[in-house]
Amino acid sequence: MTVQGFTNQGETKSDVLLAGEFPRVSFLVTITGGKYERGTILSKSDGKYTICADNPEAVLAENVDASSEDKQAVVYLTGEFNLAALTASVDVSTLIDKLRSKNIFVKTNQAY
């Protein structure tokens, strides 16, 4: 129900990617090989970033479609992130120790 004088602006989905105050370092990089959502864990190969299968390097900070050509996008090189909001080509929980060595910390403090 909309109250007289007000317009229904729809609904929003809260951003649950960020999960703490550990300093986030962001960097502009080249993304290749697919269409990725914010929160995708990325690996680096030949100077470009793509979805991670084994050696995580960064967390994608914005949606990007690099399926037809390479695109520039912002990634986080450090920070605290919510496990439920992260994706990779493998089970993210298998990457937690490798992410920690990069100062990327994974928490389970928010539902997605």
Image: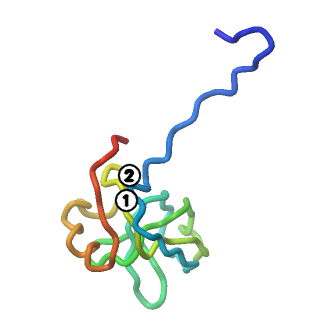
**Res 71 quadrant in image:** bottom right
Residue found 58% across the figure and 77% down from its top: 70
Q: Quadrant of the C terminus?
A: top left
How many numbered circles are shown? 2
The crowding category of the residue bearing disc 1, from other C-alpha atoms within 10 Å (few below 14, some 14 to 19, many at least 20), is many
Q: Examine the rendered structure and indicate whether residue 111 appears above or below residue 21.
A: above
In the drawing, what numbered circle is on residue 31? Answer: none
Q: Amino acid at mark 2?
A: Ala
Q: Residue furthest right?
A: 5
Image location (x, y in percent) of residue 3: 71, 10
Residue found 61% across the figure and 75% down from its top: 72
Mark 2 vs mark 1, CA separation in Å = 8 Å
**What residue sits right under mark 1 in the picture?**
81
Residue found 48% across the figure and 57% down from its top: 37
Q: Quadrant of the N terminus?
A: top right
- The foreground one among 9 and 92 is 9
**What residue sits right under mark 2 in the picture?**
85
